[in-house]
Image (cartoon, rainbow, N blue to C red):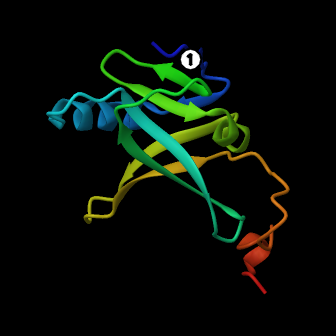
Amino acid sequence: MTTTTALSASDLELTTSAQGKMAELFSQVEENIEGVRVFATPGGCSGINFGMTFTDQLNANDGTLDFESFKVIVDDATLEYLRGAEIDFVDGGDGNASFVFNNLPQTDTGGGCGTCGSQGGGCG
């Protein structure tokens, strides 16, 4: 059995909307899964993109944020980019529903343009 670290709302927060959608998605999954893994990949203007996927595995370097019907799993390296962020679920009603990451900490990733979209500008 792998021991993980318990995360708190100060590490990563899910809005009520995101919690409701996660619970709905977990109720539809027929296979045995441990939780939803939040991960970071290089790319995008800020240098980091975030995603989520179901996982059946917990690793020693994972932290978990436990809810009644699901858990969110984040490894140590990804948590450094997410600490203090909020995950929300936004449904515009036009078929464009998605999870969004808000309040991401400003990090120096060594890549990207860093100020993409700020002040009306783009990457240049």
Image side of residue 96 versus residue 4, left or right: left
Image side of residue 96 versus residue 107, left or right: left
Quarter residue 31 falls in: top left
Quarter residue 98 falls in: bottom left
Q: Nearer the viewer, residue 58 or 8?
A: 58
Task: Kindly identify which residue carries mark 1.
Answer: 4
Q: For the residue marked with disc 1, what is the amino acid? A: Thr
Q: Residue at x 60, y 34 (%)?
A: 75
**Mark 1 crowd level (few <14, some 14–19, many ≥20, 10 Å Cα):** some
Q: Residue at x 51, y 22 (%)?
A: 65
Q: Nearer the viewer, residue 37 or 83?
A: 37
Q: Quadrant of the N terminus?
A: top left
Residue 33 picture location, percent across and down: 29, 30
| SS type, badge 1 | loop
Residue 94 picture location, percent across and down: 26, 65
In the displayed structure, would residue 67 be above or below residue 81?
A: above
Q: Nearer the viewer, residue 53 or 15?
A: 53
Residue 20 picture location, percent across and down: 32, 32
In the displayed structure, would residue 93 be above or below residue 103?
A: below
Q: Residue at x 60, y 20 (%)?
A: 7
